[in-house]
Structures are given as C-alpha cells and as structure tokens.
Image (tube, grey):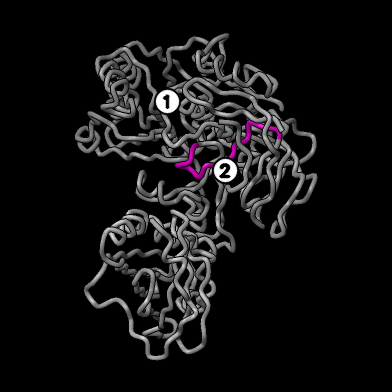
Amino acid sequence: MKTRLAEKNYSRSRAGAHPSLKSGEGIKMEKAVTINRSPDEIYSFWRQLENLPRFMQHIESVSQRGDGISHWVVRTSHGKQLEWDARLIEDKPGQMLSWQSLEGADVDNAGSVWFTPATGGRGTVVKVSMKYSPPGGKFGAMLAKMFGDSAEKQMSEDLFRLKSLLETGEIPSTEGQPHGGA
Amino acid sequence: MRALCWHGKEDVRVEKVPDPKILNPHDAIVRITTTAICGSDLHLYDGFVPAMEEGDILGHEFMGEVVEVGSEVKNLKKGDRVVVPFTISCGRCFFCRKKLWALCDNTNPSAYESELEEGYPAAGLYGYSHMHGGYAGGQAEYARVPFADVGPLKIPEGIPDEKVIFLSDIFPTGYQAAENCNIQPGDTVAVWGCGPVGQFAIKSAFLLGAERVLAIDDVPERLEMARQSGAHTVTSNGHTFEEIKELTGGMGPDSCIDAVGLEAHGSTTDAKVDKAKASVKLATDRPHVLRQAIHTCRKGGTVSVPGVYMGALDKFPFGMAFGKGLNVRMGQTHVQNYMQPLLKRIEDGDIDPSFVITHRLNLNDAAEGYRTFHDKHDKCIKVVMNP
C-alpha cells in the first residue's frame, strides 16, 4: 500500500468546510467506563483536546485552532500516519462533546462523548461513540480491517487509561521492565 | 541483576537481566532479601497458565529494603524494610476504596485482554502472566513496586525475614479463606490441601475460634505438619466423604476450605475423568476437591475457595450446592487488609509463620527449588530463597 496519504498536503483549513461523515454511515463503536471524578472535571479534561494523546494511544497530536476546528494526527497500529481536520459540532460543558472530520480526511470519522453522573455517587459514566467510514475500494477495505479489528480493543484500552490517569495520576505500565532472554 | 525467568513447561532459568527502574511516580524499587516459591507458581511451571511469554520473571512473595522511591511516594524512604503484598492496588478506585484490593481497576496495563478472558480486568499481580498485568516478579535481586504508597508494609527491626515473608501472600491467603468461613464457636472446619496455604488456613481457623479442624491430604509429612497445628488428619484415599461424614456425626463440617485448586489429584472416577479431559483440553481445570467440598459440607454451610482456578469447570455439582443452600466464597486474597493485623499476631507470639519452611536455597538454585517443590521431593513443603 503506497503512502499516498502521507503525501497529502495538510495545510488546508477551510472555513465552512463540510463534515465528511453522513448520518447512518460507517463502522460504529460504543464503549462506556465509570470514572471516580465529577462530570465537570472529566469534561474539562477532554475538552482540552490536546490531552487526548495522553490516553488515546493512536493519536499523536490534536491541535485546536480556536474556531472549533482542530487538526488531528493519528498513527495506526501498522505505523501509517493519517491526518484530518475536524470541527466541534456540539459542546455542552459538563455534559457532552461531539466532533466530526471535515472533507478531505484520510479516514472520515465522527465521535461523541457523554459525561453523566454515575449512580451511587461513584463518579461519572463516560460514554464514547465513534464512527469510521474509510474511503471505498480495495484500499478502503484494508483500512477498514486496520481500524475495525483493533478499534474496539483500542477504544477499551484508551478508556481504561483515561480512568487510571484521572483516578490515580498515572497509567499502569510495564514498559521497559526487566525480562529474560527469549 | 539475576532473576528467575520462565521459558516454558517445567523450564525456569536464572538469568542476568537489567535492574528494574522507576517507571511511574508512585513506584519504589526494593532490593530483595527473601523470596519464596508459591503453590500457584507451580501452575505456571506446569504450563496451566496462558498469556506467559518466554523470559517473564516469576515470583510474587518477596520482601526487602527500599532503595529508591518515585516522586509521589511519601510514606516510604530509602532504607525502609518492607514486605510487599502480591496484589498491586492503586488505593483510589471503587474496589480499593471498598478494601477489595485484589480487584483494583487501575493496575492492569493489559486490561483489555483480561476483560475478554475474565469479564473484567482485576488487579495486577507480580510474576503471574500477562493476564494479570505482566509485571516482573520478585524471584530476583530487585523488584519495581508500583503504588508503593498503598501496598508495602514496613517491618520493624529485630524480626527475621522468615517470620514475616509470608505476609506477602500465603498467611493472608489462608487467613482470608478461614475468615470467609464465618467461623462460629463450636464449628468444625475441613481443609483440603495441606500445602503451605492449607497449613495457614488450619492455623487461622483455630485463631478464629474453630473447635475442630479436619485436614485432608495424602502426603505424610504435610499431614504430620497439620497434626502439629492441632488438626485431625484424614488421608485422602477415595473414601474422604464417608470418613468426614462419620467424623462429624453425619452432619458434615460447618465449612470447607479448598486449598488445592485447579490441579487437584485424586483416585476417584471424577478425578480421572478431569485429568483425561484436561490433557486433551476438553476442560481446563480439575475441580475434584471442589466437588468433594460441596458434597461434604453441611447444609447451609460455607465452601471457601482460596485455591486458584483459571478456566471453566466440567460436571460442577451446582444442583447439590443449591439444594444444600451453601455459601460459596472465593477469589484472590485482599492481602492489604491482613498484613498489619497478622504482623501484630506474629509480634504477640500467637504464631510463627516460619514453621512451613522446609527448604532454604540461594536464588541461583531456583530451578532445582521448583523441581523439588513440584515433585514434593525430600519432604518439601515450602521453599524460600535468598538472592
């Protein structure tokens, strides 16, 4: 698979650009996790989109432009770099966020996250819904496999990492620990 | 440093590996002074535990001296002498706050895999496969201890390692098993398995007020050790149920502890079927002892399971358990709940846990230690090692 994606020019940013994913399209995934922090706290953390790489493993960077547009750089588990611009389409402080990639995205995608108080004073239920709609054709099918197979695992791990980060201040790790020769 | 590394079924080797480093702000590094081989390590040795990788460092019963602390560790300092619980717990999640330390949400880096296999990720454990976090274990010269502000127990000067090392796992495990029986005055408690955990379950049952403890095994030196703790022993020979029924006047014990777990041996038909099925992977665990416990326990009694199970059971007499209205309690030990109170028992002279030790080795001889322990050779009951 040639890296025509990496060669794409990403300096574009178009005011009034259209979301690239139509309602009802794409591969959809939902996951929820209960985190022992208030909805406001978690909303504020997530709203600072630059925080997303701290717990979303495949996101290399998100940079906000200040007009609701953000630029996302993602590296897939196969090492391919993908980029897109996205716009915040809904923002209710302390409650939910919704964003959608703009036209020209390497992978059309949309995401929403809701922050609702958990029962029993246990904190907040963070529910994430993500949609991916890869471009068509054989290349698209391969990309779908890349995202589809591991996407649910990815989302689950990302949410566990968010939970650990917010509840304990660190993410559990064994990277770099000693082990014997294979 | 030297560390004991897993390389496959019945293949463990002491190798030179890098020293551990602080990875997270709540970590500490401990220089290990005493470590031990656990009965559950034998499940790793026998290849019963999936998600192992060649080179994984084993060992979850260890203690030593703090040599380095991360930036967020305020309760420990360099030079402190600590026993480390085998459960890694963050202290801040729903489960830790309920004191269910072995069920911590935040210490398993491989949470997704664990969720698939077990339904929910549980706490990380030292040296016990990537299902339980893949943490390097403590059969080594040094170990990295995550959340050092939650787990390790400081040990005062003057108490030898051998008296306190088992606070890391098997003493709390035997004690929790006995505590789960909700022992009332006058009770008879039956303990299957007179290995080290069983021995501590026997002692703990008496500490918790049992009038009588029946201890079941077929290894003479283990039965003898149980007798020395005051237990009435039963040699398992295929007639255990009848014998215990008679010993309890037809009623059955008030509670039964399965301190054997998934690799149960037995000579009865169900045990033979278990072994056959496990060998062709039709079943994963061999619940021979669990079945006996359910069969033997009195109506309305408690079956308490510290013995490790990993997969699915076949022919589990759930109808019998239901018909008798049994309480069944199980799970990994919430070690942190017991370390301080049991240390006090040791300091008060109520118990000297070193009684289980039969073999003392240098870490360099660890492979031999595993072999000896596994084969119950040389009357082996518990192996401790010094790095």
Residue nearest the viewer, comparing B222 with B50: B50
Q: Check the image and report above or below for B238 versus A49.
A: above
Q: Secondary structure at mark 1?
A: loop
**Residue receiving disc 2:** B338
Residue B260, numbered circle: 1
Side of B387 where A55 appears, left or right: left
Q: Check the image and report above or below for B256 versus B157.
A: above
In this view of the protein, can residue B344 be seen by the observer? no
- Label 1 to label 2: alpha-carbon separation: 21 Å
- Where are the magenta residues, as a range? B129-141
Q: Check the image and report above or below for B196 versus A98.
A: above
Side of B282 where B198 appears, left or right: right
Residue nearest the viewer, comparing B95 with B243: B95
Residue B41 at x, y = what percent?
51, 28
Residue B28 at x, y = what percent?
69, 49
Q: Is residue B133 magenta?
A: yes
Residue A88, numbered circle: none
Q: Chain of mark 1?
A: B
Q: Secondary structure at mark 2?
A: loop
Q: Which residue is at 33% across, 16% downward?
A: B240
Residue A158 at x, y = what percent?
45, 61
Q: Chain of mark 2?
A: B
Kindly identify the amino acid type of the residue bearing the numbered disc 1: Val
Q: Which residue is at 52% across, 13% downward?
A: B376
Residue B55 at x, y = what percent?
56, 32
Main SS, magenta residues: loop
Q: Which residue is at 66% across, 18% downward?
A: B365
Q: In the image, are marks 1 and 2 on the same chain?
A: yes
Side of B307 where A175 appears, left or right: right
Q: Which residue is at 28% across, 14% downward?
A: B268
